[in-house]
Amino acid sequence: MSFPYQIKSVDQYKAAYDKSVNDPEGFWGEIASSFYWRKKWDKVLEWDFKKPTIKWFAGGKLNITENCLDRHLNTLGNTPAIIWESNDPEEPNRVLTYRELHAKVVQFANVLKNNGVQKGDRVCIYMGMVPELAIAVLACARIGAIHSVVFGGFSAQSISDRLQDAKAEFVVTCDGGFRGNKEIPLKSVIDDALVQCHFVKRVIVLTRTRTQVSMIEGRDVWWEEEIRKVEAQGNPDCVAEEMDAEDMLFILYTSGSTGKPKGVVHTCGGYMVYTNYSFVNVFQYQPGDVHFCTADIGWITGHSYIVYGPLSAGATSLMFEGIPTWPNAGRFWDIVDKYKVNVLYTAPTAIRSLMGFGLDPVKGHSLDSVKVLGTVGEPINEEAWHWYDEQIGKKKCPIVDTWWQTETGGILISNLAGVTPAKPAHATLPLPGVQPLLVDENGKEVTGNSVSGNLCIKFPWPGMLRTTYGDHERCRVNYFATYENLYFTGDGCLRDENGNYRITGRVDDVLNVSGHRIGTAEVENAINMHAGVVESAVVGYPHDIKGQGIYAFVIYQGTHGDDALARQDITKTVSKIIGAIAKPDKIQFVSGLPKTRSGKIMRRILRKIAEGEIDKLGDTTTLLDPSVVDEIAKGRL
Ligand code: WTA
């Protein structure tokens, strides 16, 4: 494949950027022409951020899997599309060429059809990182079903909430999953989730761990048996469903500052164009490159930069089932050398955790296949940036610090590897087509350089969210109502003297723990489910490895008087309600919470206490009971 839209120099970047601002429709229309459309679009862009309505390539007809698979068959049929590395280094790897992946997607698409899945139906996918996860995702896209992948670490309650919100009648899962030395009983978690979801008609279960599972008659079927049925039918083709550019491709749930996670909706045409464009440009993809994105497909990073971006570009995407520290902290480096990885894309939290093991695990690895390093998901501190640069990149590999969100579909602010300059801990410049803007608390634009503000985007890009599933008003209120005519990201940001952006973190009540988004309200609701808890307040605090840790202040009226046990119980409750990723790192029992006279918890004060900045609490005189602050500060953990 060739990519006429790949930017090769700073001048080309500037020219592309200018064109994208002056003539966005011409700019994106030209890029989109490189894809395979059944029918060309009538209009490149229609938009109104007030409503909001955003339509890209309206009237265009396509199927994203024809762009990720079929169009590569003649030229890249025997090229590996997915290389899979097991959790267990001793287990043989698996390689699926584009031809093989295509055949498997077609086969599973027929399984879905045989099981009654139709265009527009929602399919919840709850699996470990096995190739069949990517196959299931693509098979949904092939028949026009809307996939909603739920990360394998979420609890039964979280799955059940998502199933109900998406009204998903179909589930694809595994018997279990492997992660490090843990085995996750995925099917049994699904069984618990489905107790509250009788509308689910079918559960398709892939064998992975051979753990015992209960199969419910009439509801549950085995993946392998369903495949055999399709084989018995003579492996018929499954012609890709013709989709409108604005038909839904997937729903992905993510945390916000209030309420339950919301289902971010992405559509077929714009998402395809944007993930491909950003993949090819940010990582400077060259044919033959092995791309290793260490995220899980349960998150947006896996959707965009394991599945859709790389495959639409004909790249080889490496999928890893396990974790960086198992069986030891050299696992990533083993994998890099084993497959001659060219691009490594991971999270700052992984880098910090690996740094903690010193240089021994890195020694003995050549790492000389690596050309580009990337980070995503949270701000990277300079120390981690330099370690990554020196020890992994040997100071020869550009690092792309990619800022984006579930809602943005793809990378919005990043340097382009080796093309535009990097700056430690800075995402640097917007991609062509992306128009960032900083505003102050009053919504007034902050102009010029060496300034800070809340990060907004003032013009649509093809990969942006279109709605939140089942509740368009929530989408409007969350993203488009804070500042008029702007998409508000929820992030705070600095712009340096040269116009480089540095994202400093969330300015709303969303935490970023090890690169995972978690709403404080969600954690509080989970803690409050515990019978002994009267009330709680949750804030983030700086954590050396996780970036942010979860600090919970809890008013507790349990009777057994054993604090350690009470902490354990509360932690367990949060794991049950949300999942282990949301477990508080610290739980402090308090007799009251700092509240204003109108009953609002003053989180600012709690945040300062959690951060250890007790001398900077600011004005506490407006509190109902200022003395509670002293008590909390004294009891700080
Ligand atoms: C944060 C992950 C600093 C940010 C792709 C954003 C970052 C949230 C960066 C989205 C980065 C992501 N530098 N912060 N390079 N990338 N973030 O939806 O706060 O899981 O709003 O998407 O992660 O998290 P999400």
Image (cartoon, helix red, strand yellow):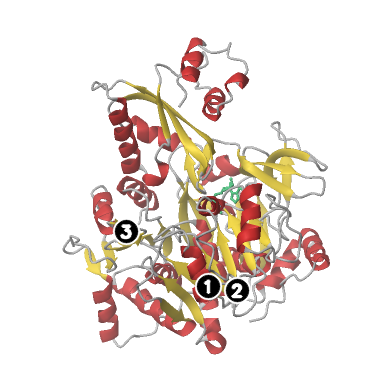
Q: Is residue 475 above or below residue 25?
A: above
Badge 2 amino acid: Ser
Give the label on residue 337, or none: 1
Q: Mark 3 touching mark 2, by CB under 8 A?
A: no
Q: Could you tell me residue 356's position as x and y percent?
A: 52, 50
> Which mark sits nearer the N-terminus, 1 or 3?
3
Dot 2 falls on a residue whose secondary structure is loop
What residue sits right under mark 2 in the picture? 369
Q: Mark 1 touching mark 2, by CB under 8 A?
A: yes
Q: Residue 569 vs residue 48: left or right? A: left
Q: Residues within 10 Å of mark 1 (few under 14, many from 20)?
A: some
Q: Is residue 140 above or below residue 360?
A: below
What distance separates the C-alpha of mark 1 from that of mark 3?
A: 43 Å
Badge 1 amino acid: Asp
Q: Name which residue lies at 47% across and 42% down.
A: 518
Q: Could you tell me residue 452's position as x and y percent?
A: 73, 38
Does any atom of ligand 1 lie closer than 8 Å to the CB of label 3? no
Badge 3 amino acid: Glu
What distance separates the C-alpha of mark 3 from that of mark 2?
A: 45 Å
Q: Name which residue lies at 68% across and 57% down.
A: 414
> Which mark sits nearer the N-terminus, 3 or 2?
3
> Which mark sits nearer the N-terminus, 1 or 2?
1
Dot 3 falls on a residue whose secondary structure is loop
Which quadrant is the C terminus positioned in?
top left
Q: Mark 1 touching mark 3, by CB under 8 A?
A: no
Of labels 3 and 2, the one closer to you: 2
Dot 1 falls on a residue whose secondary structure is helix
Q: Nearer the viewer, residue 242 or 442?
A: 442
Q: Could you tell me residue 210's position as x and y percent?
A: 23, 67
Give the label on residue 169, or none: 3
